[in-house]
């Protein structure tokens, strides 16, 4: 026999306890809805700013109720923030050195770590610049007064750039002209504004129409450019963080990264 609610006179529901039961049901439903919501803070290399911002907004559209807060900067600086307890769920570095240090310190979940993307190193100057730079060797010319690059100690692009210059025998010869930047976006700014005659950046950063690529780094002149990503062990929303990591590796996200010029894994294309 089907259960039938007994009919009650107006106001009787309060006396019989029906309202508390209904209220409890509503609270359970609200609680379930809130369980699907949350906030994520993602710290990522500055060179990912355009692409990752688009990917994060795409993720939010697929997961209503979840908000992704993006924190961009040099990978070294971001890693130090995590070491000092910054509330971060996911870290995406532009180099393995910073991620390796966090893993050795037990600050990331190694089971979630994956190499997400790759990139290339290029030498750029401002579009329309009259400074005679046709290749890496021209950096040693007196005509080049300022060469911008990321600080090697904290900026992966600067680390790769130094490796290229050392490989070509130019590191000692360009010391007088070096202008160090806090991240690769500042290198781009220095070149575009004429505060540097040339700059060493990632290929993805050179897509700015105000820049002209002079030369790519020769094969074998630096370590492979790898962007590792991982969930931070102290994450307050570990489940959402792992979900976001999965989305970063999805075909949908990889299509965005590829459009911005990043090298994506074959299976992600």
Image (spheres, rainbow, N blue to C red):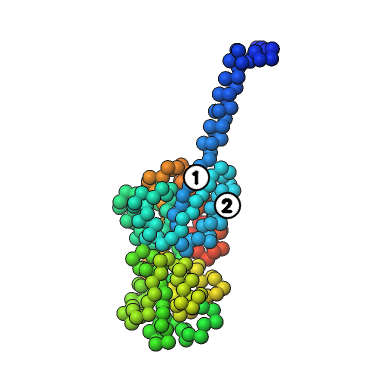
Residue at 38% from the left image edge and 45% from the top image edge:
234
Compute the Cα span from label 2 to label 1.
Answer: 15 Å
Callout 2 secondary element:
helix
Examine the rendered structure and indicate whether residue 66 appears above or below residue 225: above
Residue at the limit of the structure toward the front, as seen here: 11
Q: Is residue 88 visible?
A: yes
Q: How far across and how far down the image is residue 74, in percent? A: 41, 62
Taking depth in this image into account, of 149 and 231 the one nearest to the observer is 149
Labelled disc at residue 148: none
Q: How far across and how far down the image is residue 14, in percent? A: 61, 16
Residue at 50% from the left image edge and 64% from the top image edge:
262
Left or right: where does residue 252 sit relative to residue 143?
right
Which mark is in front, 2 or 1?
1
Labelled disc at residue 58: 2
Q: How far across and how far down the image is residue 29, in percent? A: 57, 30
Taking depth in this image into account, of 112 and 56 the one nearest to the observer is 56
Callout 1 secondary element:
strand
Labelled disc at residue 39: 1
Q: Earlier in the sequence, mark 2 or mark 1?
A: 1
């Amino acid at each position: 026999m089907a259960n039938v609610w007994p009919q009650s006179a107006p106001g009787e529901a309060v006396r019989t306890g029906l309202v508390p039961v209904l209220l409890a049901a509503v609270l359970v439903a609200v609680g379930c809805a809130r369980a699907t919501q949350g906030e994520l803070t993602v710290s990522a290399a500055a060179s990912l700013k355009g692409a990752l911002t688009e990917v994060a907004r795409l993720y939010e559209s697929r997961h209503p109720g979840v908000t992704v807060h993006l924190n961009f900067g040099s990978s070294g600086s971001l890693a130090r923030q995590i070491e000092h307890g910054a509330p971060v769920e996911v870290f995406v570095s532009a180099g393995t050195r910073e991620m390796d240090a966090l893993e050795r310190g037990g600050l990331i979940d190694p089971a979630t770590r994956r190499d997400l993307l790759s990139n290339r190193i290029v030498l750029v100057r401002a579009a329309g610049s009259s400074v005679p730079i046709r290749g890496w060797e021209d950096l040693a010319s007196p005509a080049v007064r300022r060469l911008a690059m990321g600080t090697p100690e904290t900026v992966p692009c600067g680390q790769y750039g130094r490796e290229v210059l050392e490989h070509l025998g130019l590191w000692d010869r360009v010391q007088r002209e070096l202008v160090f930047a806090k991240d690769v976006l500042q290198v781009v700014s220095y070149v575009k504004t004429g505060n540097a005659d040339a700059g060493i950046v990632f290929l993805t950063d050179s897509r700015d129409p105000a820049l002209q690529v002079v030369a790519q780094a020769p094969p074998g002149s630096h370590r492979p450019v790898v962007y590792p990503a991982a969930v931070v062990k102290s994450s307050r929303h570990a489940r959402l963080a792992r979900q976001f990591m999965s989305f970063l590796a999805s075909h949908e996200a990889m299509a965005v990264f590829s459009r911005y010029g990043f090298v994506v894994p074959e299976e992600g294309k």
